[in-house]
Image (cartoon, rainbow, N blue to C red):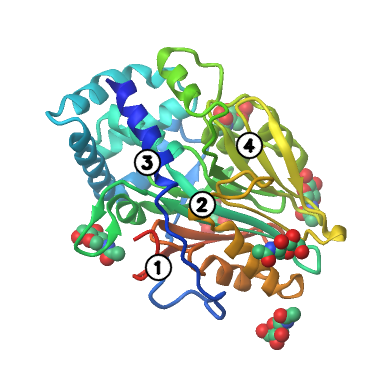
Amino acid sequence: MFLRVLCILCIFSFVSLQYVPPYTEDCRTGMYPPSGPTFKGAVPWYTINLELPPNKRWTQIIADKKDAMISLAQAVRDLADAFVPSGRLEELVDKALPLMIDTLPYPFNEEIKGIATASGVPLGETLLLNIFYEVFTVCTSLVAEDPHGNLIHARNMDFGLFMGWDMKNHSWVITEKLKPLLVNVDFRRNNNTVFKSTNFAGYVGMLTGIQPHVFTLTMNERFSLDGGYIGILEWILGKRDGMWMSFLTRSVLENATSYAEAKKLLSDTKLLAPAYFILGGNRSGEACIITRSRTHNLNPLELAVKQGRWYVLETNYDHWKEPLFLDNRRTPAMKCMNQTTQANISIKTVYDVLSTKPVLNKLTAYTTLMEVSKGTLESYIRDCPSPCMPW
Ligand SMILES: *[C@@H]1O[C@H](CO)[C@@H](O)[C@H](O)[C@H]1NC(C)=O
Ligand SMILES: *[C@@H]1O[C@H](CO)[C@@H](O)[C@H](O)[C@H]1NC(C)=O
Ligand SMILES: *[C@@H]1O[C@H](CO)[C@@H](O)[C@H](O)[C@H]1NC(C)=O
Ligand SMILES: *[C@@H]1O[C@H](CO)[C@@H](O)[C@H](O)[C@H]1NC(C)=O
Ligand SMILES: *[C@@H]1O[C@H](CO)[C@@H](O)[C@H](O)[C@H]1NC(C)=O
Ligand SMILES: *[C@@H]1O[C@H](CO)[C@@H](O)[C@H](O)[C@H]1NC(C)=O
């Protein structure tokens, strides 16, 4: 039964790519500092002490975000009931998934248990939410080098296509439910920052983060048949030699000590499913797109400023292939980057690029801007009032 649900999830994420109509507008300018109808507030900051036992780390955040988490869990339950009426699915999630929690590596298993306890959301559902995030992210990430050799790494996080359309106000139910869960977290040891990230409260993996002055990292979903979600099915069936993608990014952010080490770990660690890792270092020329199959880094793309490649940009398609024409966010994003020129690239102009439809769209939950040399990460909750795709 759970397999069936997971298959439904997979089909949905493939189907989703085929229904996004093209929609472009002129490159935005003067959007920064964020304001106006596409800006719904700055993401609030929290600190997590990595010296605490893992099951206590998220307590403060969950205390604040409990209601939003319960509301999301309810929305996911409603969606599940729509697929498999009678509540049998919930029963299964609540009974079967908790048995798998300790097959997850430490500290993730303990952190998820702590989150379930603190929120009151049943353990199985908390685990399901963590799996959900791995499977449903559609995004745009880029790293650009300015004329002084500073690297700017930015991303839009798009999430929730086909997960319930709200007829009344034209929004995606899950995307809207995620916005109140957004938190920026400053992870500390001995009260010193180890890394900072933008997260959905309740999710222990990392999709966006910075180790100040060392590297920046984002992950995008890769919808690929080469490996596909078979690894996730295998994991459920008991074959557990691959790593969850966002657990790897978390480990890298927490424990890698250089761009080179981060690059190696992200390129060579066996994964449960394909993914794109977008990595920036702290020196001129240090940025790359790592296109992962479950086992390999395929056709790596590196920054090459001397050859004119002063930025790398990734949506959800292999860089050596054309994007699906119905979901082409790459061309509009590149058009705006090219129009900006390297001479004028900055946090400000990158925010303009990420504010241009369809790079900004109805699924966009947040925009994050990172500057490794300053050690900064800033995140903004986004909105895309109609007309805006998809729907
Ligand atoms: C749409 O309505 C839902 C529920 O009433 C609300 O949570 C959400 O924030 C609204 N979305 C927008 C974009 O106004
Ligand atoms: C931790 O560092 C912050 C500033 O970085 C400071 O405000 C705070 O007082 C420190 N806390 C402790 C317990 O030292
Ligand atoms: C990072 O390394 C420390 C020390 O080896 C370990 O305790 C911790 O679990 C690691 N963190 C992650 C997320 O793997
Ligand atoms: C870049 O990162 C390395 C560690 O990989 C560090 O030794 C170096 O000081 C950093 N450079 C700058 C300019 O922060
Ligand atoms: C942007 O510029 C790069 C490098 O000159 C070029 O390869 C690419 O086709 C351009 N893309 C767009 C959409 O203008
Ligand atoms: C860079 O920005 C400045 C001020 O915004 C503008 O005057 C100039 O034309 C821009 N340069 C390029 C090459 O776009």
Q: Quadrant of ligand 5?
A: bottom right
Q: Secondary structure at mark 3?
A: loop
Q: Which residue is mark 4?
A: 252
Instruction: Assess disc 2: are there few (<14), some (14-19) or many (≥20) residues with their C-alpha within 10 Å of its C-alpha.
Output: many
Q: Quadrant of the N terminus?
A: top left
Report the residue at 48% width, 23% height from top: 230
Q: Is residue 358 left or right of residue 302?
A: left
Q: Which amino acid lies under the numbered mark 3 shown in the image of this protein?
A: Gly
Q: Which residue is mark 3?
A: 202
Report the residue at 51% width, 51% height from top: 139
Q: Which amino acid lies under the numbered mark 2 shown in the image of this protein?
A: Cys
* Distance from Cα at disc 4 to Cα at disc 1: 29 Å
Q: Which residue is mark 2?
A: 139
Q: Is residue 329 left or right of residue 304?
A: left
Measured as percent of width and height from the top left, residue 86 is found at 12, 28
Q: Which residue is mark 1?
A: 41
Instruction: Assess disc 1: are there few (<14), some (14-19) or many (≥20) residues with their C-alpha within 10 Å of its C-alpha.
Output: some
Of 183 and 266, the residue lying toward us: 266
Measured as percent of width and height from the top left, residue 221 is found at 52, 42
Instruction: Tell me the quarter of the picture where residue 10 sits.
Output: top left
* Residue 286 in sight in this render: yes
Q: Quadrant of the C terminus?
A: bottom left
Measured as percent of width and height from the top left, residue 6 is found at 35, 28
Report the residue at 63% width, 34% height from top: 292
The verdict on label 2 being within 8 Å of ligand 5 is: no
Among the two numbered marks 4 and 1 on one chain, the one whose residue lies closer to the N terminus: 1
Q: Which mark is residue 51?
A: none
Q: Is residue 135 left or right of residue 262?
A: left
Among the two numbered marks 3 and 4 on one chain, the one whose residue lies closer to the N terminus: 3
Among the two numbered marks 4 and 2 on one chain, the one whose residue lies closer to the N terminus: 2
* Distance from Cα at disc 2 to Cα at disc 1: 20 Å
